[in-house]
Amino acid sequence: MIIKSNYSKGGSYKTYLKVVQSIRSYLNENGYLELDLPVLSPALIPEAYLEIFKTEFTYMDKKQDLFLTPSPELFIKRLLAQGIGDCYYLGKSFRNSEPHSPRHQPEFTMLEWYKVGEDYMYMADQVLKLLQHIARATSGDGAQITYQGSQISLSKWERFTVAEAFETYASIKPNILLDESAFINIAKDKGYKTESFTYEDLWSQIYTQEVEPHMGMNGYPTLLYDYPVQFAALSKPNNDGVTAERFEFYIAGLELGNCYTELTDPVLQKARFKAEDKGRKTSGKIGHPVDWGFIESMEAGMPDSTGIAIGVERIGMIFADVPAIQDLSLITFS
């Protein structure tokens, strides 16, 4: 692996700094407390869909496994339960075994942002205002931006439920989308290989191939909301019992953030943790102790709240008008 310095891309980097500074100014001006949190932990929230980095602390004859945090959520939820209130973290997170590509890095900057007493649709309104704030800071125009030749208005969201998006772009009706056996049959009819693949695997394949490329491509950012509960392990369920209060948002086909109305039921959360931990073991992912203290903090009184995780480099790509995360970096690896 070669280390490269990229000062020739300093203009994009300076725009990225403006993005980071404008995120901080927006949140600070609106009363959110910035958190300084660890990036090493002896236990993690089990998440079957992602891989983690494992390391080891050694001192004399003592050794302890530690893990780079894929998000700061396990720390922030404890603080919310203790009454810290509206807050955010803006710093490094780490995810292993993802492709090194224009949209992914194993080490990346995450904004994780929580509002107490509100739900995911409140956060959707706040995110749109944040985008407008960043646009004013980087270009002076909070109404619209240009990304890779396309004009994007920040005046409103284009809105789809997940069910509407699958019906519009993959021709899969809502009653099929949430029926696992029927969905697998549809995937097979579409030509996807279904042997040895789960419903979740095939759902993700069709979503990635047929739905996601259309998100944020119609002149506005897209808000995609109400995911099946199988894809929203930390979200509050909707009253229908099959979807949950989760959204993702997109600009120009690029997924930028993931939001929940936070689950506050410790019994349900514990059951989901067990299922996710089992999924990690079944898939052969790196083992780690489960953070059962997370459940204890919920039992102590997790307040109703909404939280969102945003990939800051991806936001930087949009406002610096560059096609790759690496175009923002002063140092890259190849």
Image (tube, rainbow, N blue to C red):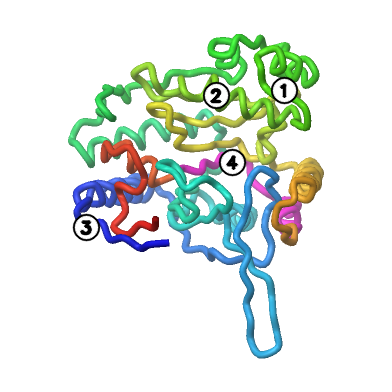
First in sequence: mark 2 or mark 3? Answer: 3
Residue 305, numbered circle: 4
Q: Is residue 193 above or below residue 136?
A: above
- Residue 127 position (above or below residue 219): below
| Residue 168 coordinates in the image, percent (x, y) | 54, 10
Residue wearing tag 1: 239
Disc 3 to disc 1: CB gap under 8 Å: no
Is residue 57 found left or right of 274 in the rendered image? left
Q: Amino acid at mark 2?
A: Gln
- The answer to if 202 sits in the magenta stretch is no
- Amino acid type indicated by mark 1: Asn
* Depth order, front residue of 267/194: 194
Indicate the quadrant where residue 163 lies: top right
Q: CA distance from mark 1 to mark 2?
A: 29 Å
Q: Is residue 307 magenta?
A: yes
- Give coordinates of residue 187: x percent, y percent: 69, 18
How far is the residue under mark 3 from the one under mark 1?
A: 52 Å
Look at the image and give the residue range highlighted in magenta: 292-310
Identify the residue shown where x is 21% and y is 57%: 7
Is 134 in front, or is 10? 10
Left or right of residue 244: residue 295: right
Mark linked to residue 209:
2
Asked if disc 2 and disc 3 are in contact, CB closer than 8 Å, the reply is no
The crowding category of the residue bearing disc 3, from other C-alpha atoms within 10 Å (few below 14, some 14 to 19, many at least 20), is few
Assess disc 1: are there few (<14), some (14-19) or many (≥20) residues with their C-alpha within 10 Å of its C-alpha. Answer: few
Residue drawn 66% across the image and 25% down it = 203
Q: Which numbered marker is on residue 7?
A: 3
- Mark 1 or mark 2, whichever is nearer to me: 2
If the image is split into quadrants, where does the N terminus sit? bottom left
